């Protein structure tokens, strides 16, 4: 009973999130997280007699560990806003749309463009809002399959959110596990690209029986109803700027800031330096291209990015981080940790269980960021408390944990009908293209990217076949061993 009482704050957090996403309870995570944190503090005092000052210290200490993450997030949001406003995003789309599209190619093109744009901007929501108006109306013009195309946009938008250098989920999941963002990206890079290629093949294959009518981006944008522009202006103002830039055209060289960021990241430059170079290059090239009206206007975009990060994601992370600190202080997850440790016969089974925990947490909380900051410390503790190995091998396990948190959070969200992601995408798609009544299943049915990513990472981890993918292999026995197995061998000797 005491163990269940200690876990009850998680049930409260999950219940409020689900009620907010599915029911009539209109509460934001910024309200839910403080409620759950206060309740967790009460439970900590009631069950462990932990003093109030110690509870506060535990919450603050857990938040302190995220300080560098906060700075990275602010710059990431600023660079995403700059890329949208200076024409980097529009250049990516226009380069892809130079060739006329048909129903056979609109879905796979939407998938690839959304994937590249999401890497550039670090946001799946912003990418979806920016590309859906173009590709859903293009799909209409060429008589394509709206469900197939919307799944392509959603899957591509989530690709960069999972592996993008400036994605908040990438930054946060890496920070919680104590690994460098660039190391995380290298670890999962080949696996992610393989998932992308396989998904692209499936999108093209499922489109082969569709018509050959040719359409253009300009025609698609001209067909967007006025009420859709109003909706976008309210929900994603930067998407309106991007659409106008796509229609009017921007110089192709505006894609260079993205190339600069990717190049220096691959070279191993620190994340903050990569983001700084992205901001500077987009500003300088934007001045040449005329997409930056003035330094004051550019700084306004940077300010918008800072304020967006500070007004929501950073504040949310602080509260959920505080919640995790209180839960750890009263050892709320120890029974769960003990159970997984008991049933796991080797390190791979333990890591597989960490993946399953991430999926369950995402389903329960219905929010990928809430899952990352709540379940992330649990799976981190499971490895640190139960596995023994060299510093290098333990770091690789941390990389896999970070990948679990992010990939099973972002891609897993696409397969959970009640998830906030699915709700947002369905709402935007319906508002943008009212000729089709989108439902949650439309975002799941053809979401090949999400299906492939979720299934493959779990199976590869459990079977050990991840060793066949460059840089993705996870150390196994005897390099890393469960501590209980070491004790058993010692006792037998």
Image (spheres, rainbow, N blue to C red):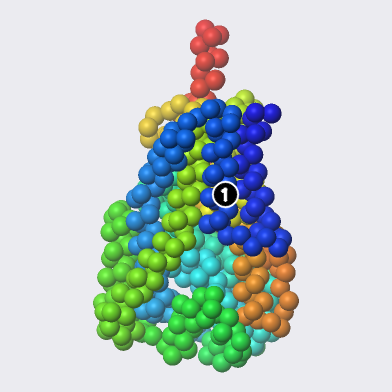
Left or right: 208 in relation to 196: right
Give x and y (percent) for residue 97.
50, 82
409, 418: nearer the viewer: 418
| Depicted 206 relative to depicted 270: above or below | below
Left or right: 83 in relation to 370: left
Identify the residue shown where x is 61% and y is 60%. Answer: 27
Give x and y (percent) for residue 69.
38, 52
| Depicted 156 relative to depicted 341: above or below | below
Residue lying at the far front in this picture: please name it: 52
426, 365: nearer the viewer: 365
- For mark 1, what is the residue? 35
Q: In which quarter of the image is the N terminus?
A: top right
Give x and y (percent) for residue 330.
53, 31
Can residue 221 be seen in this snapshot? yes
Give x and y (percent) for residue 490.
50, 11
Query: Which quadrant of the structure image shows residue 271?
Result: bottom left
Query: Which quadrant of the structure image shows residue 56?
Result: top left
Identify the residue shown where x is 51% and y is 41%. Answer: 324
Identify the residue shown where x is 71% and y is 73%. Answer: 438
Left or right: 366 in relation to 264: right
445, 11: nearer the viewer: 11
Identify the residue shown where x is 46% and y is 81%. Answer: 242
Query: Which quadrant of the structure image shows residue 296?
Result: bottom left
Q: Dot 1: few (<14), some (14–19), or many (≥20) neighbours within 10 Å? A: some
Number of numbered discs present?
A: 1
Q: Is mark 1 on a helix, strand or loop?
A: helix
Can residue 416 be seen in this snapshot? no
């Amino acid at each position: 009973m005491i163990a269940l009482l200690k876990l009850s704050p998680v049930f409260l957090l999950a219940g409020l999130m689900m009620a907010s996403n599915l029911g009539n309870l209109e509460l934001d995570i910024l309200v839910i997280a403080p409620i759950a944190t206060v309740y967790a503090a009460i439970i900590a005092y009631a069950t462990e007699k932990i003093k109030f000052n110690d509870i506060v210290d535990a919450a603050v200490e857990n938040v302190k560990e995220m300080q560098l993450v906060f700075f990275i997030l602010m710059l990431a949001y600023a660079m995403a806003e700059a890329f949208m406003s200076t024409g980097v995003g529009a250049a990516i789309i226009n380069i892809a749309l130079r060739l006329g599209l048909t129903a056979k190619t609109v879905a796979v093109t939407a998938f690839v463009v959304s994937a590249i744009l999401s890497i550039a901007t670090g946001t799946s929501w912003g990418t979806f809002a920016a590309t859906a108006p173009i590709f859903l109306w293009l799909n209409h013009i060429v008589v394509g399959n709206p469900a197939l195309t919307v799944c392509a946009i959603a899957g591509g938008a989530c690709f960069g959110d999972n592996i993008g250098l400036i994605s908040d989920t990438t930054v946060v999941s890496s920070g919680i596990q104590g690994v460098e963002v660039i190391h995380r990206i290298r670890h999962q890079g080949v696996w992610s690209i393989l998932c992308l290629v396989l998904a692209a093949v499936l999108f093209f294959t499922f489109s082969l029986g569709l018509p050959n009518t040719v359409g253009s981006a300009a025609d698609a944008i001209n067909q967007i109803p006025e009420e859709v522009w109003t909706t976008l202006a309210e929900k994603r103002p930067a998407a309106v700027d991007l659409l106008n830039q796509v229609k009017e055209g921007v110089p192709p060289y505006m894609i260079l800031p993205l190339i600069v960021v990717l190049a220096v990241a691959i070279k191993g430059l620190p994340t903050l330096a990569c983001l700084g170079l992205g901001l500077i290059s987009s500003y300088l090239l934007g001045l040449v291209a005329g997409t930056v009206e003035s330094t004051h206007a550019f700084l306004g975009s940077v300010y918008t990015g800072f304020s967006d990060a500070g007004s929501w994601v950073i504040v949310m992370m602080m509260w959920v981080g505080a919640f995790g600190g209180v839960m750890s202080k009263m050892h709320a997850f120890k029974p769960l940790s003990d159970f997984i440790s008991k049933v796991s016969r080797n390190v791979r089974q333990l890591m597989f269980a960490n993946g399953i925990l991430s999926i369950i947490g995402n389903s329960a909380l219905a929010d990928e960021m809430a899952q990352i900051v709540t379940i992330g410390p649990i799976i981190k503790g499971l490895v640190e408390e139960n596995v023994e190995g060299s510093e290098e091998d333990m770091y690789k396990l941390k990389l896999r944990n970070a990948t679990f948190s992010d990939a099973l959070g972002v891609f897993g969200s696409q397969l959970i009908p009640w998830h906030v992601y699915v709700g947002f995408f369905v709402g935007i798609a319906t508002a943008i293209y009212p000729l089709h009544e989108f439902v949650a299943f439309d975002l799941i049915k053809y979401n090949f990217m999400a299906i492939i990513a979720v299934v493959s990472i779990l199976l590869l981890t459990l079977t050990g076949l991840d060793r066949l993918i460059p840089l993705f292999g996870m150390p196994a026995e005897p390099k890393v061993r469960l501590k209980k197995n070491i004790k058993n061998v010692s006792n037998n000797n």
